Image (cartoon, rainbow, N blue to C red):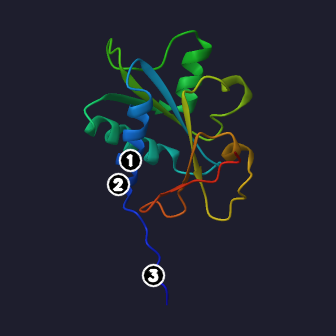
Amino acid sequence: MTTRWAPEKKDVMRELASEILHNYARGRVLVAVDAPPGSDTAGFAADLVEAVRAEGHAASGEPLDAFATRRAEGSGPAVPGEVEDVVHVVDGPGAQRDDLRGTWHLVLWLAQAGEARGGTGRAGATIVVDAADPGHPRRVYDDAC
């Protein structure tokens, strides 16, 4: 029997937070956590918010539906106070739909077991994370470059 190495969730979250902050250290940064319908984007997004905060940076989050409603009304994301440098994580299947395309600085796609590599949401993501095992998510480098 072969044992497959699986990274700890906290380590993956720390690496993602570090990468986001390396690339987007200043300003109000919008990060989308997208996935196929029925996926736990909320749990992943909450963990990402905590990882960004653990790096000493302001972070907040909200569900996609709330963000889309607020955007349609002409108001900005639900960011705490008047924080200038903040990572705002928005989660929910459908974050890459046409009316939101171009909104995000970064899109994380949570790939599920059995999902085809070239799926629409996955192909449009900046970062793909294999989330089939929620306790051991794994960054996947399968871009089409």
State left or right for residue 137 relative to residue 102.
left
Please tell me the numbered disc located at residue 83: none
SS of the residue at dot 3?
A: loop
**As drawn, 121 above or below 137:** above
Question: Decide: marks 2, 3 in contact (CB < 8 A)?
Answer: no
Residue visible at 43% across and 62% down in the picture: 136
Q: Which residue is mark 1?
A: 15
Residue visible at 35% across and 14% down in the picture: 84
Please tell me the numbered disc located at residue 11: 2
**As drawn, 2 above or below 53:** below
**As drawn, 142 above or below 101:** below
Residue visible at 41% across and 62% down in the picture: 135
Task: Name the kind of residue labelled 3 in the image.
Answer: Thr
Question: Decide: marks 3, 1 in contact (CB < 8 A)?
Answer: no
**As drawn, 142 above or below 33:** below
Residue lying farthest front? 145
Question: Decide: marks 2, 1 in contact (CB < 8 A)?
Answer: yes
Task: Name the kind of residue labelled 1 in the image.
Answer: Glu
SS of the residue at dot 1?
A: helix
Residue lying farthest bottom? 1
**Quarter of the figure that contains the C terminus:** top right
Q: Estimate the x, y position of residue 118 in percent, counting from the top left.
A: 74, 52
Task: Name the kind of residue labelled 2 in the image.
Answer: Asp
